[in-house]
Image (cartoon, grey):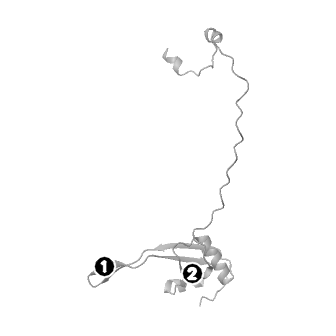
Amino acid sequence: MAWNVFKKKGSTPDASSASAAVPVDTQKEQRPAVQKVVPAKKVSRFSVSADAIFIHPLATEKALAAVRHDVYAFQVRTKATKIDIKKAFANLYGVMPTGVRTMRMDGKRVRFGRREGTRASWKKALITVPKGTTIDIS
């Protein structure tokens, strides 16, 4: 009896089950055609002019040394995506970047007398341009 639990129903016809078989309706129930839902084109959360995406270029020793390797560093808006930054850079400087790397920089802890606080967090973008291309950051 326990072995019958693992057998698929209807896989082996028995004489007892053949007499009790009920004819199956050959016509399948017709369902209405399902329309395929096409997702809307994803729009960036942050669409602003190119001037508003870049806050200022970074003028640190490390950023200036990276210019020799065709990498420019900028502080950008925190909600700007890599695609937004790439398009804005191409519009602003007329050079299509080969790569964009972004990083979130946490604000540093500061003290004002007895009061403690933090500076605002910000976003840094490292933009790589094609070899031999230079841009005027000023």
On the image, the x and y values in percent for residue 69 come to 60, 81
Secondary structure of the residue carrying tag 2 is strand
On the image, the x and y values in percent for residue 132 come to 67, 83
Secondary structure of the residue carrying tag 1 is strand
Residue found at the very far front of the displayed protein? 32
Q: Is residue 83 left or right of residue 61?
A: right
Q: In the rendered image, which quarter contains the C terminus? A: bottom right
Residue underneath mark 1:
116
Seen at 58% across and 80% down, the residue is: 52
Residue found at the very far bottom of the displayed protein? 138
Q: Is residue 114 left or right of residue 26?
A: left
Residue underneath mark 2:
54
Residue 132 shows in this picture: no
On the image, the x and y values in percent for residue 2 come to 48, 17
Seen at 72% across and 41% down, the residue is: 33
- Quarter where residue 18 is shown: top right
Residue type for callout 2? Phe
